[in-house]
Amino acid sequence: MTTAVLGWFIAGICFTAFIILWFWVSYREIYVKRCSLDAISEQVTMHRKLFMQERGGAYDASAQNVLSNKLLAYGKTEEEYNAMLKKPLHCIPAYIFGFRPTGKVDKL
């Protein structure tokens, strides 16, 4: 009987370690992508304000070009983030940790 209990105990420890590592790695990857998405969102907001200030000025075309590049980068990062949340490896930990898909391209 003690051999069976010891076997179940070791299996329980291994299973718990697997779950902890799975959630830790998923959280770390999703968190990094989310931080980059937030950073690009702040940059888009900043460049949008700068574009509004420069409208009709000497640097209007360059400000619009920078803003469009930032919007493209934001859209690409957002697609990657949302695709990451749909992957089977990340969907359960992402849901438990509160990561949700974003759709803020229209709102910015």
Image: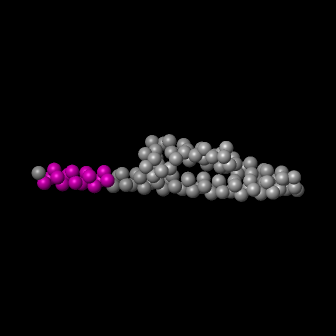
**Numbered-mark total:** 0
Residue 49 figure quarter: bottom right
Foreground pick, 39 / 17: 39
Residue 16 screen position, x and y as percent? 32, 53
Does residue 26 show up?
Answer: no
Q: Residue at x 60, y 44 (%)?
A: 103
Q: Main secondary structure of the magenta part?
A: helix
Left or right placement of residue 99 versus residue 76 in this view: left
Does residue 74 show up?
Answer: yes
Residue 43 screen position, x and y as percent? 68, 57
Q: Residue at x 35, y 52 (%)?
A: 18
Residue 54 screen position, x and y as percent? 83, 56
Q: Residue 14 lies in magenta, yes or no?
A: yes
Q: Residue 40 lies in magenta, yes or no?
A: no
Q: Is residue 27 above or below residue 85?
A: below
Residue 47 screen position, x and y as percent? 74, 56
Q: Residue furthest front?
A: 107
**Colour pattern of the rendering:** one colour
Q: Residue at x 37, y 55 (%)?
A: 20
Highlighted magenta segment, given as a residue range: 2-16
Left or right placement of residue 79 versus residue 60 in this view: left
Q: Residue at x 65, y 53 (%)?
A: 41
